[in-house]
Image: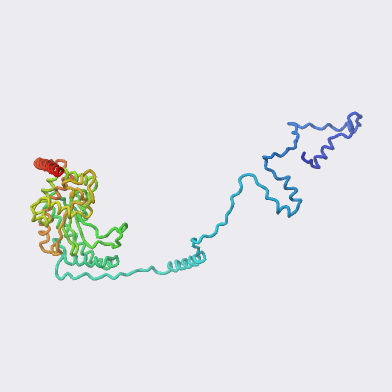
Amino acid sequence: MPPKRSAEAVRRSSRRTSNKSQYFEASETEESDPPPKKRRGRPPKKQVERIPSEDVYEEEPVQEPEEENGDDDDEDAPPPKRRGRPPKKQTKREPSEDVYEEEPEQELGDENDDDEDEDDEDAPPKITVIPVEKLRDTDGVDYEDFNVHKNTLLFLRDLKANNKRPWLKSHDGEYRRALKDWNSFVERTSESIIEADETIPELPVKDLTFRIHRDIRFSKDPTPYKPHFSAAWSRTGRKGPYACYYIHCEPKSSFIGGGLWCPDAGQMQKLRASIDERPNRWRRVLNDQDFKRVFLPKAASKSDPEAALLAFAEKNKSNALKTKPKGFVAEHRDIELLKLRNFTIGTQIDDDVLSADDAQDKISDIIRPMVEYITFLNSIVMPDPDADDDSDDDGDDDGDDDGDDDGDDDGDSE
C-alpha cells in the first residue's frame, strides 16, 4: 500500500493545484499568481508496494490482528521470532554441596579480627625470654688447640638429645665455646695433614669446616642441627673435585677417613676406565700393608690380593649399583669395583683419641697410610698436566690383561 500523506502535505498540494481548467481564460487575480517553483534534483521514485517474500522474516501484519483479538489470543499464540542469533538460555545454577559458604560468620570474624588488630597495635610487643644456661665447668682442664676438649663432646651429646632451636638458643654460650674449640683444633690439625701430604695447601678454617645447621627444606628429618663437628682437607678445601681427608667428631661415632664421595659423571667415567684398563694399580694401592692394617683390617691377614678389593667394595656398597654399569659385561673381572659410586675409606676412633694430649700424633698415624690412596684418586680424576704414566705399571697391566683373557677362555671352554 502507498504511504499515507499527512494533512500538511495535502494543504500544500491543494494550494499549488489550479481550480479551473487551462481551457478557460484566467482572471486578473489568477494571472497575478506566480507559477509554482520547480524542485531541483532527481524526481521522487515511485513507491511500489513491496510484496513480502517467504525468506524475509516479518511478523508485523500478523501482530496487528493478534493485538485486536484480545488477551486470550495472545496467550495461545507463539511469541514472535527475533532476527539474529537466539539468546543463550540462562540456566539457574543450583548451589553445590561442596561450596562452603560461611559469609555471615566470616564477616563477624573479620570484624573481630579488625578489633584484635587495633588492640594489637595499641598493645606493647610480645617478647619471649629464653633463659641462658650457665657454662659447664671445665674441671680445671684448659682448652687447647691440639685436641678437642671433653666439654665439646659433652655439648654434642646434649645437642643430639635436645635437637631444637630453643634449646640451642638457651645454650648459645656453650655452643660458641665448643665451636671455637673445634675451629682451633682444625687449624692445628691442618699442619699435621700438610706435613703428611704436601699437595694440601694452607687454607682458612672457614674453607675446611662444615656448618652445624641442616638444610631441612627437602628433608623428611625435621631436626635443625647436626649432632657433630666435621672438617675436610683437599687441594680446594672441603669443596671441589679432589679427593679429601675427613675428620668426624661425634660422641661414640667419631672416625677419620677420606676419598671421593659421590663423584660426578665425568669422574665416574674416568674411575671405571682406570679400573678396566689399569687393574693392577688398584690392587697395588689397596694391598698396601699399612693401608690394610688401618682401613681394611679384615683383609690384612690375607695374602690374596683379591681380598682387599672385596673388603674395599664391601665398605662402599651402601649406594652401589645393583647391576653392571653401562658398557661393561657382567662377567668382568672387577665388576664389584665397577659397580661402586663411592670410593671412600675410614676407620672409627674412640672419643679419647681426639681429646688426648697426643691427639695430633694419633691422627697423623691414621692419615699417613691414606696419602698414597688419595694421591692415586687425584691422579685419575684430576691428573696433573706434566704427569707421565709409569711404564712399569703399564707393562704389568698388559701382562695381567693377557692372563685375564686366557682365564676367560678357559672358563668358556669349561
| Residue 12 rendering spot, x and y as whole percentages | 82, 38
Between 166 and 345, the one nearer to me in the picture: 345
Residue 84 position within the rendered picture, expressed as x and y whole percent measured from the top left: 62, 44
Q: Is residue 66 left or right of residue 11?
A: left
Please tell me whether residue 407 is drawn above or below residue 115 in the rendered image.
above
Closer-to-camera residue (188/371)? 371
Q: How many marks?
A: 0
Side of 266 where 55 appears, left or right: right
User: Of all residues shown, which one is farthest toward the front?
Assistant: 414
The quadrant in which residue 411 appears is top left
Residue 216 position, x and y percent, is: 30, 59
Asked if residue 385 lies left or right of residue 301, the reply is: right
- Say if residue 81 shows up in the picture: yes
Nearest the viewer among 336 and 349 is 336
**Residue shown at the point (70%, 53%) measured from the top left:** 76
Give the color scheme: rainbow, by chain, secondary structure or one colour.
rainbow
Quadrant into which the N terminus falls: top right
Residue at screen point 61% across, 45% down: 85
Image coordinates for residue 247, horizontal then vertical, percent: 17, 58
Q: Quadrant of the C terminus?
A: top left
Q: Visible in this render: residue 364?
A: no
Q: Is residue 158 above or below residue 73?
A: below
Vertical relation: 106 (above or below) 315: below
At 24% from the left edge and 48% from the top edge, which residue is drawn?
Answer: 264
